[in-house]
Amino acid sequence: MNEAHTQTGSKIRATAVRTLMAVTLKSRPLEAALDDMATEAKLEARDRAFVLNLVMLCLRRYGSLKRLLADMLDSGLPKNATWTEAALITGLAQILLMRTADHAAVNETVSLIKNLSGKEAGFAGLVNAVLRKATREHDALLTKLNRTPKNDVPSWIYDSWAKSYGPANATAIAATLQTTPQLDITVKDKTTLADWAGQLGATTTPTGSLRLPLCDVTALPGYDTGDWWVQDMSAAIPATLLGNITGKHVLDLCAAPGGKTMQLAASGARVTSVDRSENRLKRLHANLARTDLRADVYAKDAARFTPKTPVDHILLDAPCSATGTLRRNPDVIWTKNEGDIKKLASLQERILDHAFSLLPVGGTLLYCVCSLEEIEGKGQIEGFLKAEPKAKRVPITASELGGLTELVTKDGDLLCLPSYLADKGGLDGFYAARITRQKI
């Protein structure tokens, strides 16, 4: 391996290390951290993609990789050896979990440590020894890495899941981090579902999404013409629970990036979409333009917005911790804490109260979150129903979900755990409740 190639490889891996540290030590969102680090390093698209894949994998397996590393060291690393620890984690991920050539993972990780300023450069020999041991004992170490799924999530999150869903389900949810998520697609015209399944080589889920392995969606037929969009199977369910909405005015609160807005518009509704983030609304506008669908879009606070004309139904995809998307967005479980969850629950309560005030008698409000935290889902709705006598739960039925009885709670709410349908690729965690306003 020539020196220039090693230097390039070290720069790429240094970018991955810096990004991983930004997420785990400074609680920065992965996307923002990677944008900054990759831009500063002037990485090409291919190298940036490698960094993204590597950091995503490290975050999905972060707890177990840290535990394995600790077991491999006779004495722990000094507290200030943050670069060394992060570099070792990325190196172990490449050797044990990726198809990266062992010599590249070892040599280029060692090289980046050697080039550090300060005392950590002296740990290059240790890094070399640990990573070479990983190449020799690959199978045994991989078995050990995968043995205890609960290690891959912070203990406070695991304990929360165990309390809400039982230890077995909590462990099964954590185990999904050992798998790669699928790519789910929502087709604009449901009458063409079978045609698109054939063209894309996809399978059809019971709830009407198309599923295929992860790939570059922009290269697939139908993307440029806007015949479909990417949307996880579970996230595509709530918009289907409003019944026949042709000609109805539906308010989509916290709507960006627009998956549910497009579903509502494609179903014939007159849609008003609201989100406070102008930056996120850029994606919604782009998605509407690509799919040739229409909605009135406002950059406003959902807890205060009042539409110009009365609405018939409301879909509220409330801001949440997003812990249900842990496979696709593994940074969320390392950048959130219990205090964040409580703040989000308070915000959800305010938006829900306001949304219900806009709902007419007989209208339907769909409340949903892509969170596994009970305080944001079931707990939020139970508190709301107790406080609001005019609100009544309308149970969701398995027949509305393609017969998937496991997705319906005893109260008649939708609850998707990431471990459900594991043999078919799993799904994102999601909660939804259907409420109507009754006349008293």
Image: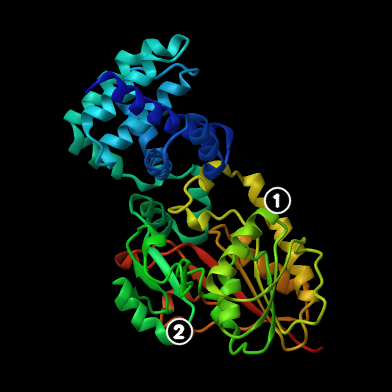
Residue 27 lies left or right of residue 5; in this view the side is right
The correct choice, above or below, for 75 with respect to 49 in the image is above
Q: Position of residue 421 (x, y in %)?
A: 36, 68
Q: Earlier in the sequence, mark 2 or mark 1?
A: 2
Q: Which residue is mark 1?
A: 343
Q: Is residue 70 visible?
A: no
Q: Position of residue 70 (x, y in %)?
A: 36, 27
Residue 405 occupies quadrant: bottom left
Residue 187 lies left or right of residue 143; in this view the side is right
Determine the residue positioned at 47% across, 23% down. 82
Q: Position of residue 147 (x, y in %)?
A: 29, 44
The correct choice, above or below, for 141 with respect to 11 in the image is below
Work out whether residue 231 or residue 324 is closer to the camera in this orientation and state it.
Answer: 231
Work out whether residue 354 or residue 144 is closer to the camera in this orientation and state it.
Answer: 354
Q: Position of residue 69 (x, y in %)?
A: 34, 29
Front label number (2 vs 1): 2
Q: Which residue is mark 2?
A: 190
Mark drawn on residue 150: none
Badge 2 amino acid: Lys
Determine the residue positioned at 32% across, 37% down. 93
